[in-house]
Image: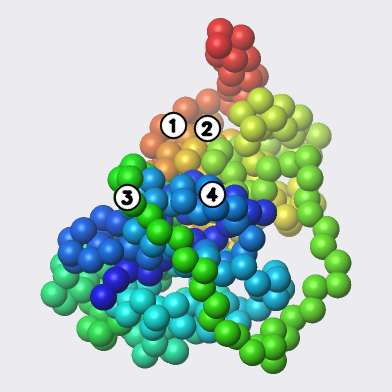
């Protein structure tokens, strides 16, 4: 029996999320007195694969098959299910992101496994296996028991500290033998965004709301985001007004993000917005209304005029960079 964790890579590199989910899996495996097997699908160099061992992976199953570049969920799910069976895994862990949410339900069906999505911490009980997740638009927690022999969970980003736990990791080539007819998507062309930080990848996000009063006032936020190497986002009213692109809209009806640090300038904090950003590790809110709902979710809050606070933030960041 083992814990299988699906580790995504981005252009052959693992990111913080990959190490966080392996650390999470290693902590569970320790309590279950078992081992962690990480499944990597894609072209990843040997040294990069072995880096997962630094965080507790005992074995890496390396799948390097060009066909998976089409990102067919059906084929990916089949590969994960076969790896789980090969490793006799009784727990399979995915990230709670677009890819994990697409693949995990298919895998749970293939393995006849109970599934819980958006798990926010280590199990609260192992018999029965019980995990905690956020419910009611992130306003409450629920403990959910999984009673099937095999369990599938998706793990919410920023819910567990990265823990170094060096192990003697073995890398093995794994061929799930997926038939060609499972790869139905054809990628004709690829256009990658350059010159900006993708919101779903950003460790820091600077976001503006209706309190910014118009598209002509976004220069300060753009400068601050550039100084911090941050992603730039907005609330739904801003994108609906056409002030910013819908690609920058974060919230329950936009992009769901979980950065380490989220700045909310002039955002009131409607429940739909908080539903998309509440997994942020830290939230800093700036709003002139002391009763704005955003302050209930914020870790740090400033009651003030965004047009006075933003320049002060910019100057503070410049001074900090100059000092270093």
**Which quadrant would the C terminus be assigned to in this image?**
top right
**What is the secondary structure assignment of the residue under circle 1?**
strand
- The residue lying at 29 percent from left, 77 percent from top is 90
Labelled pair 2, 1 in contact (Cβ < 8 Å): yes
Q: Is residue 171 above or below residue 81?
A: above
Is label 4 or label 2 in front? Answer: 4
- The residue lying at 53 percent from left, 47 percent from top is 47
Marks 4/1: CA–CA distance: 39 Å
- The residue lying at 66 percent from left, 25 percent from top is 227
**Which one is nearer the viewer's eye here, 255 or 126?**
126
Q: Looking at the image, is mark 2 or mark 3 earlier in the sequence? A: 3
Residue holding disc 1? 301
Whether residue 102 is visible here, answered yes or no, is yes
Q: Looking at the image, is mark 3 or mark 4 earlier in the sequence? A: 4
Marks 2/3: CA–CA distance: 44 Å
**Which percent across, then down, holds residue 73?**
60, 79
Marks 2/1: CA–CA distance: 6 Å
Residue holding disc 2? 286
**Which one is nearer the viewer's eye here, 164 or 194?**
164
Residue holding disc 3? 167
Residue density around tag 1, few if under 14, some if 14–19, many if 20 or more, within 10 Å = some
Image quarter of residue 9: bottom right
Labelled pair 3, 4 in contact (Cβ < 8 Å): no
**Which percent across, then down, holds residue 29?**
25, 62
Marks 4/2: CA–CA distance: 40 Å
Residue density around tag 3, few if under 14, some if 14–19, many if 20 or more, within 10 Å = some
């Amino acid at each position: 029996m083992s814990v299988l964790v699906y580790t995504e890579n981005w252009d052959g590199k693992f990111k913080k999320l990959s190490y966080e989910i392996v650390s999470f899996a290693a902590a569970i495996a320790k309590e279950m007195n078992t081992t962690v097997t990480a499944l990597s699908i894609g072209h990843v160099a040997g040294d990069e694969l072995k880096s997962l061992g630094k965080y507790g992976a005992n074995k890496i199953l390396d799948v390097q098959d060009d066909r998976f570049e089409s990102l067919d969920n059906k084929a990916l799910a089949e590969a994960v299910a076969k790896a789980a069976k090969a490793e006799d895994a009784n727990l399979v862990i995915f990230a709670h992101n677009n890819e994990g949410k697409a693949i995990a339900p298919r895998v749970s069906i293939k393995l006849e496994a109970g599934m819980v999505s958006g798990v926010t911490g280590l199990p609260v009980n192992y018999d029965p296996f019980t995990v905690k997740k956020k419910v009611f638009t992130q306003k409450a927690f629920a403990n959910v028991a999984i009673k099937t022999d095999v369990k599938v969970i998706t793990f919410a980003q920023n819910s567990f500290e990265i823990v170094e736990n060096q192990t003697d990791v073995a890398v093995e080539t794994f061929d799930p033998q997926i038939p060609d007819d499972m790869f139905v998507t054809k990628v004709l062309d690829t256009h990658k965004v350059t010159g900006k930080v993708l919101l779903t990848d950003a460790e820091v996000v600077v976001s503006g709301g209706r309190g910014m009063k118009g598209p002509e006032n976004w220069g300060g936020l753009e400068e601050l985001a550039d100084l911090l190497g941050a992603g730039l986002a907005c609330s739904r009213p801003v994108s609906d007004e056409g002030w910013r692109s819908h690609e920058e809209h974060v919230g329950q009806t936009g992009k769901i993000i979980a950065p380490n640090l989220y700045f909310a300038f002039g955002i009131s904090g409607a429940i739909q917005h908080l539903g998309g950003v509440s997994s942020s590790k830290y939230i800093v809110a700036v709003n002139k209304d002391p009763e704005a709902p955003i302050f209930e979710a914020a870790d740090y809050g400033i009651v003030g005029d965004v047009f006075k606070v933003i320049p002060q933030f910019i100057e503070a960041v410049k001074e900090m960079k100059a000092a270093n």
